[in-house]
Image: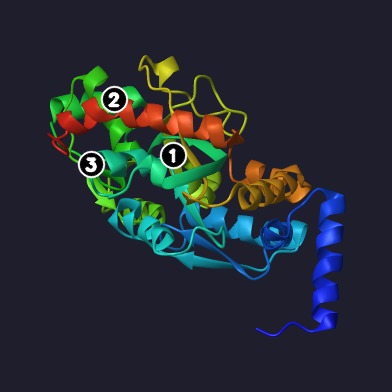
Amino acid sequence: MKMTRRSLGSRLITAALCATLGLSTAMMPVAATAAGFPEKSVTLVVWSGAGGALDTYGRKLAELLEKQVGWSVKVDNRPGGSGAVGVSQIMNQPADGYNILVLTGTLTFGIAQGLIPFKIDDLRLLRAMQSEPSSLAVLADSPLKSVDDFVKYMKENPNGLKVGGHAPGGFHQYMLYQLMKQGGFESGWIPHDASGKVTLGLLGKHLDAAMMTPSTGLSQVKSGEIRLLGVSTPERTEFLPDTPTFKEQGYNLEDSIWRGIAVKAGTPDDTVNAIQAAIDKVTASEDWKKFQTEQLQDSPDWKEEEFTKRAKGELESQTEFLKASGYIK
């Protein structure tokens, strides 16, 4: 390629400036790209259908990334396969941060069962932004008034109630399994592919009881149409002061499910840092704090190192349940 005096002079000036700043010309395009992230619309890939707690979180996050940070954000619901469809969508995109996965703690259940054909290390788990307990829920007109009522009925009538919740072999079935072990009863499980459908199952009396997050049927819980017999917090939560814990009713059930974001492994650190800085602005906003309170959510705010460590620990601890329930050998 022929180089004119002007183009040669421009190259020399650029090189001189870079030398003064201690940079190389080879580094300039990368630095410019990272500094400008995002330069186009970002997609939040929500791995569940519309209407559930995860979708509500994802849409609020999209709204606040636009309002607080100035990003252009699209929401893409990809339900199915216990999260596998959403993870696959991320894996089919470049590792550039423009596709961010919105996921829950059922990630480890799906990986353990082989339903999600990827490893934790195929993702960079960036931030856990919400956590919420499981609860045992019935309709307000149910004769069951406590966890003991439920356990007693199921002991006297094995599989006598239609019990279900979100996903096969996921967090809420795991919580039911723990209650079964401690209460000495048997129960089936009717899985739903979106948490919003669990509420509809209760309201339509296709379910007699559900293990679910309180926010799954938020308006019905607040109105009293759905009654929570117990929640899996260590002590009564400020969000549900009138709902007893499982523990105070004699059952050692303490656990919560997280919701957060991840990107494809290999996404550059500078891009990840830009995403983390944006999330910091969101979580510091009064809009986010109000949303968390309204949705009855705790805010763990685990960043990448702690988030990844916790997820890997969960993957190990869930094996017994999955084997006992016949989901894995």
Left or right, residue 278 beside residue 179:
right
Q: Residue at x 54, y 29 (%)?
A: 306
x and y percent of residue 135 in the render? 41, 34
Q: Residue at x 30, y 42 (%)?
A: 111
Q: Look at the numbered discs 3 and 1 and tell me whether their residues touch, using CB distance below 8 Å.
A: no
Question: Which is closer to the viewer, label 1 or label 2?
Answer: 2
User: Please, what is the three-letter code of the amino acid marked with disc 1?
Assistant: Arg
User: Please, what is the three-letter code of the amino acid marked with disc 3?
Assistant: Gln
Q: Nearer the viewer, residue 222 or 174?
A: 174
Task: Provide the residue designation for mark 2.
Answer: 179
Q: Is residue 145 visible?
A: no
Where disc 2 sits, the SS reads: helix
Task: Provide the residue designation for mark 3.
Answer: 113
In this rendering, is residue 255 above or below 259? above
Label 1, label 2: how many angstroms apart (C-alpha)?
18 Å
Task: Provide the residue designation for mark 1.
Answer: 227
Where disc 1 sits, the SS reads: strand
Left or right, residue 274 beside residue 169:
right
x and y percent of residue 152 in the render? 23, 23
Q: Residue at x 38, y 55 (%)?
A: 87
